[in-house]
Image: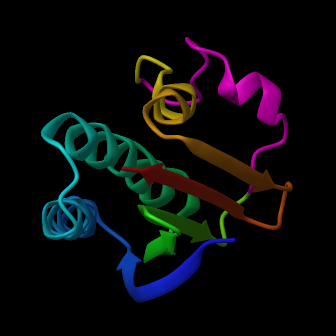
Amino acid sequence: MATVIKTETARLLSEADVVDVRQRVRKHAVEYRFGLVDQTKLVTAASEIARNTTKYGGVGSVKIEILEDGIRTGLRLIFEDRGPGIPDIDLAMRDGFTTGHGMGLGLGGAKRLVNEFEIDSKPGDGTRVVLTRWK
């Protein structure tokens, strides 16, 4: 069972907050000696989900947790918003699906970049996405 050794929370309201989250995630990944590839994957996934949070969820937040599990170190990112929710998660996870003007790679792409991915969303009740990357 992983133990949380450090945590911080950041708001997600605008594109500037997305940039801030990217910087925070990279700082922690460097501090805890994640390799460059792992850093890039984690920052990219965080950016995609943070952007979705601000674009579709309106007001949101991310909790960044540093984890230890035996000899492993991990970063867990918990994104939450109070937006309209996702009516069909399976459809939203498919590559190419978009409700905006993007390429439709956000959720599925983020999932492929991390070791653990969870999503919980109900129409009218917001969305929660959890990303975890281990080194």
Along the viewing direction, whichever of 23 and 30 lies nearer the viewer: 30
**16 displayed left or right of 18:** left
Q: Image point 43% across, 33% down: which residue?
A: 113
Across and down, in percent, residue 43 comes to 27, 48
Q: Quadrant of the N terminus?
A: bottom right
Across and down, in percent, residue 117 comes to 63, 45
**117 displayed left or right of 29:** right
Q: Identify whether 23 is placed above or below 129.
A: below
Which quadrant of the structure image shows residue 93? top right
Along the viewing direction, whichever of 90 and 86 lies nearer the viewer: 90
Q: Identify whether 53 is placed above or below 67.
A: above
Q: Is residue 93 magenta?
A: yes
Q: Is residue 97 magenta?
A: yes
Along the viewing direction, whichever of 12 and 45 lies nearer the viewer: 45
Across and down, in percent, residue 46 comes to 37, 51
Q: Main secondary structure of the magenta part?
A: loop
Q: Identify whether 99 is placed above or below 77.
A: above
Magenta extent: 85-101
Q: Identify whether 92 is placed above or below 26.
A: above
Q: Image point 66% across, 64% down: which residue?
A: 83
Across and down, in percent, residue 44 comes to 29, 40
Which quadrant of the structure image shows residue 30? bottom left
Q: Image point 39% across, 42% down: which residue?
A: 45
